[in-house]
Image: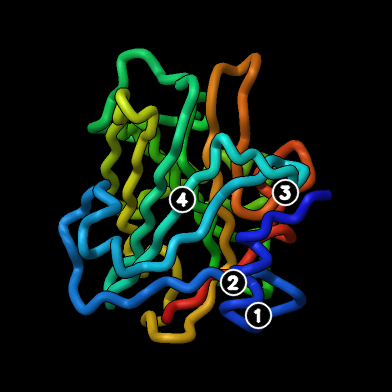
Amino acid sequence: MKVSCCLLFCFLAIGGCHGKDKPVIESLHAEHDATLNTDPAAPFWRDSRPFYAEVDTAGHVVPEYRTEIRTRWTSNNIYFLFICPYKNLYLKPGPDTAHETNELWKWNVAEVFIGSDFKNIQRYKEFEVSPQNEWIDLDIDLKKPHHEDGWLWNSGFEHSARIDNGKHIWYVAMRIPFTALDTRPPAPGTTFRVNLFRTEGLPQDSKEIMWQPVMGKTFHVPERFGLLRLK
């Protein structure tokens, strides 16, 4: 298996982990919440250290789809920005951005899987946004026979998306309330289990790009999650 150099850097540079040999992302604190935007040059995003989703399910590097991700947090919310270079988009016809889109994962999306329970790792939350700003959030419990039923849960998260056709890049920003993730108030050092994904292209030639490789056919492999620590 090829090992991404950025993953190795992330683990070594940030130093240490919660658990056994887990790579760590640091989310940079911001004093105040900001208007949600998808401009990576905006001051809110510019100060945060980028990390990358750039491997496929088996851990092979896919440089043409290297996806930059940034994250910040405030006393109320955690933010994510995805910067997704693309070749071909597979988009749902007639997008509905006012209502939740069940089974949005059938089309191209950016996804955050994040959990605060280190004892029951099969419980976590899932957030998806499409390039057209469609959305779905799910309360996942893998012990249930139909964990996809978790889409009936509502986190109150906010999102923004846009497609730059000229540059062949699409962007997604998310603002997720901490109250949807944890009963603890956020503080420096608070740690979450996390993995991040995006999909690309038509079903017959789809690409799955992720931060930590799942080494299987489903994204729902909590044993493969890395860690996110509030800084």
Which is nearer the N-term, disc 4 or disc 3?
4
Which is nearer the N-term, disc 1 or disc 4?
1
Q: Check whether the beta carbons of the residues at disc 2 and disc 1 lie within 8 A of each other.
A: yes
With respect to residue 30, does 81 lie above or below? above
Q: Secondary structure at mark 1?
A: loop
Closer to the camera, 144 or 48?
48
| Amino acid type indicated by mark 1 | Cys
| Amino acid type indicated by mark 3 | Val
Q: Check whether the beta carbons of the residues at disc 2 and disc 3 lie within 8 A of each other.
A: no
Which is nearer the N-term, disc 2 or disc 1?
1
Q: Which residue is mark 2?
A: 24
Q: Which residue is mark 3?
A: 214
With respect to residue 132, does 155 lie above or below? below
Q: Is residue 150 left or right of residue 101?
A: right
Q: Which residue is mark 4?
A: 68
Q: Please identify, in this view, whether the residue under mark 2 or under mark 4 is nearer the observer.
A: 4
Q: Which residue is mark 1?
A: 17
